[in-house]
Image (cartoon, rainbow, N blue to C red):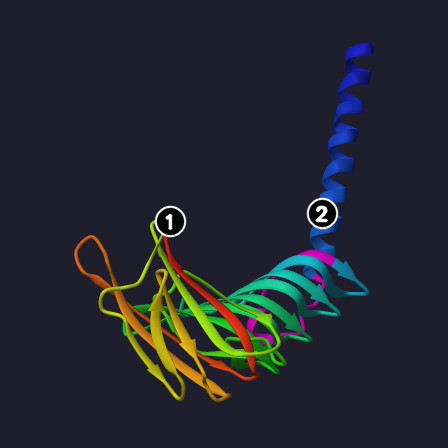
Amino acid sequence: MKTLLLKQTTLFSIFVLFSVALSFAQQNNSCKVLMKEISGSYKGGCIGGLADGKGTAIGEDTYSGSFVNGLPEGKGEYTYSNGNVFTGYWKKGIKEGEGKFRYSINGKKSILVGYWKNGEFAGPSKPGEDYSITNLSGIENYSITRVADSGKLVEISFERVMKKYIPDDLSVTLSSGYKIEQNKKMVIQNYVYPLTCELHFSIPMAMDRKQCNFTFKIMEPGKYEAFISNN
């Protein structure tokens, strides 16, 4: 009798768990994603019949991240059918804010890093800053900091394998001012803003040399420190 009761209890528990899982699956199948390209299937948070919260939507493309009212909003990763990937911020299903776009053209992989506005790339630098980056390739890390409001001076430091250096084949093109080497830094003085500075150099790789390009524009007078590293 006890054995029969135990079996009945076990079967009932399995039935309840199956019913809950089925109900959850039905809820997610009925939860709508309002972006056509990713509206095939959805798994994740749902409010009022719309994708809301963390979730993953799969259609022609795939999106995994935050949803609000059925659309990507907040941070998420969007993978296109051709393999290109955007990781960053969204607003009402449109790229908006900081992000990174990894893409390939004719088999060559590239990365676009910066800010998006209304779904379009607005530039590598956040709008309203004292500088902007207009060209960036082959550079792992960089920073530009305004350290003083007065003066007309830019100090550029390079780092490779955790050591400061100046590249042997460094090419510098300036819209104004002049440059000097000082204490393993490239120093730009007496420029007229806006200053455009183009840097081109290469670093040794296993079988070849990697080309590095970095172009920035200083929008306001002051003293700036720029740091470029490939470690």
- Image side of residue 177 versus residue 20, left or right: left
Q: Is residue 9 above or below residue 141?
A: above
Question: Within the magenta stretch, is there residue 31?
Answer: yes
- Image side of residue 84 versus residue 149, left or right: left
**Residue drawn 82% across and 65% down?**
48
- Image side of residue 186 versus residue 152, left or right: left
**Residue drawn 48% across and 89% down?**
192
Residue 198 in percent (x, y) is at 36, 79
Q: Give the mark nearest the N terminus, 2 or 1.
A: 2
Residue 205 in percent (x, y) is at 23, 56
Residue topped by disc 2: 22
Residue 74 in percent (x, y) is at 67, 66
Quarter of the image for residue 82 reads bottom left
Residue 140 in percent (x, y) is at 40, 60
Q: Nearer the viewer, residue 23 or 109?
A: 109
Residue topped by disc 1: 162
Residue 60 visible, this angle: no
Nearer the camera: disc 2 or disc 1: 1
